[in-house]
């Protein structure tokens, strides 16, 4: 079965995107049946006339890719954000009679009401264009069916290759907090800066390592260096073995995002034995069990973020070993890429029959 699959650029140096990382994983474990079609803005790409022109050309390029590859399935990966909804509705309508899988990777308007009625109508049309709709969790599936009654949504949580993250023995010492992802204010960067500033002011000792890229990189790096000095390290964009080594050196993943789907950074960090402190948004609670394998926070609640970090930094070695073990076990048992690909292949077969 041949699949034409969409996402932003798969080059992590051009685009730090959870959707792109998940699509890279699908292609790597899919047995060579995939053709990738790039749809989405690169990190350093400006919203200027060149970008607008490229969007007008996108449907033509998509139809050319369809004619060239003759896929059995079109797999459109989207997020419920205004620009992504409009772009992917155009692609869906350009797909003609090809069966479409619409894979919704979170976004602010999965779990909250649309602020724009026109975009809401576009979103409904996009959902109706699909033969199969995939959501990241039962909660997000229920939200989509409330938004578009009668819609049948399949649940397929994100997954990682857990074999990349073997259990290692960690040295006991000052803890290393890590951020891994897109450097955008929506990821809670201001809260990270202020939480670190307050921890330092109260005498807590820790390191902070940041990996990623995005429009707010320079502002964030400058602020963190001011707060932490030599205890802050920026490692750029990492992938593959370098990402595994980075997470093996980390103890806490801090991700106080304003909205999320099911971040691969959370799954990867937990597979490596990091304890996540992450926002209770999107499908995060389907993997992070508060007080057992990590901690859920409300984005923007600095008192709560600070309290969780202070408790973690004060705990002893027995506590840490239990939480690391719990974090690894849930990802290995429920979010491994091998089981994911079996379920996705079943959905491909089921969707192809609808042609």
Image (cartoon, helix red, strand yellow):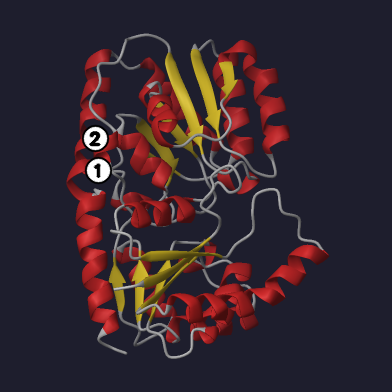
- Check the image and name the residue furthest to the right: 49
Which residue does the numbered mark 1 point to in the structure image?
331
Q: Which mark is residue 207?
A: none
How would you rate the neighbour count of disc 2 (Cα within 10 Å): few for under 14, some for 14-19, many for 20 or more?
many
Q: Position of residue 285 (x, y in %)?
A: 33, 50
Quick check: 121 above or below 290?
Answer: below
Q: Position of residue 256 (x, y in %)?
A: 51, 41
Q: Name the residue at 60% across, 74% down.
A: 87
Q: Which mark is residue 328?
A: 2
How would you rate the neighbour count of disc 1 (Cα within 10 Å): few for under 14, some for 14-19, many for 20 or more?
many
In terms of secondary structure, where does tag 1 sit? helix
Callout 1–callout 2 Cβ contact below 8 Å:
yes
Q: Name the residue at 55% across, 46% down.
A: 16
In the image, taking residue 33 as reference, residue 50 lies left or right, namely: right
Picture quadrant where residue 52 is located: bottom right
Quick check: 291 above or below 51?
Answer: above
In the image, taking residue 38 as reference, residue 33 lies left or right, namely: left
Q: Name the residue at 36% across, 24% down.
A: 248
């Amino acid at each position: 079965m041949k699949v034409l699959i969409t996402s932003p650029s798969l080059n992590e140096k051009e685009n730090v995107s959870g959707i792109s990382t998940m699509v890279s994983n699908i292609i790597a474990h899919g047995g060579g049946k995939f053709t990738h079609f790039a749809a989405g803005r690169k990190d350093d790409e400006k919203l200027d006339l060149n970008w607008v022109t490229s969007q007008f050309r996108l449907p033509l390029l998509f139809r050319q890719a369809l004619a060239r590859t003759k896929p059995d399935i079109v797999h459109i990966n989207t997020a419920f954000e205004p620009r992504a909804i409009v772009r992917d509705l155009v692609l869906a309508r350009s797909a003609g009679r090809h069966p479409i899988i619409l894979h919704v990777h979170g976004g602010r308007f999965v779990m909250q009401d649309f602020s724009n009625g026109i975009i809401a109508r576009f979103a409904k049309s996009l959902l109706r264009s699909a033969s199969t709709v995939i959501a990241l969790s039962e909660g997000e599936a229920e939200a989509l069916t409330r938004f578009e009654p009668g819609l049948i949504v399949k649940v397929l949580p994100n997954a990682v290759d857990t074999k990349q993250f073997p259990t290692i023995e960690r040295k006991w010492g000052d803890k290393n907090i890590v951020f891994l992802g897109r450097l955008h204010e929506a990821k809670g960067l201001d809260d990270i800066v202020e939480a670190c500033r307050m921890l330092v002011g109260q005498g807590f000792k820790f390191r902070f390592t940041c990996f990623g890229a995005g429009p707010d990189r320079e502002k964030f790096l400058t602020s963190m260096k001011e707060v932490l000095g030599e205890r802050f390290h920026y490692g750029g964009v990492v992938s593959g073995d370098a990402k595994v080594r980075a997470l093996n050196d980390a103890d806490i993943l801090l991700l106080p995002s304003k909205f999320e789907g099911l971040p691969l950074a959370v799954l990867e960090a937990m597979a490596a034995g990091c304890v996540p402190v992450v926002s209770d948004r999107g499908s995060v609670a389907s993997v992070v069990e508060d007080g057992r394998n990590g901690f859920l926070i409300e984005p923007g609640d600095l008192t709560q973020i600070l309290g969780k970090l202070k408790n973690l930094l004060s705990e002893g070695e027995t506590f840490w070993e239990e939480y690391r073990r719990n974090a690894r076990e849930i990802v290995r048992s429920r979010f491994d890429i091998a089981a994911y690909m079996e379920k996705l292949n079943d959905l491909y077969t089921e969707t192809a029959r609808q042609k």
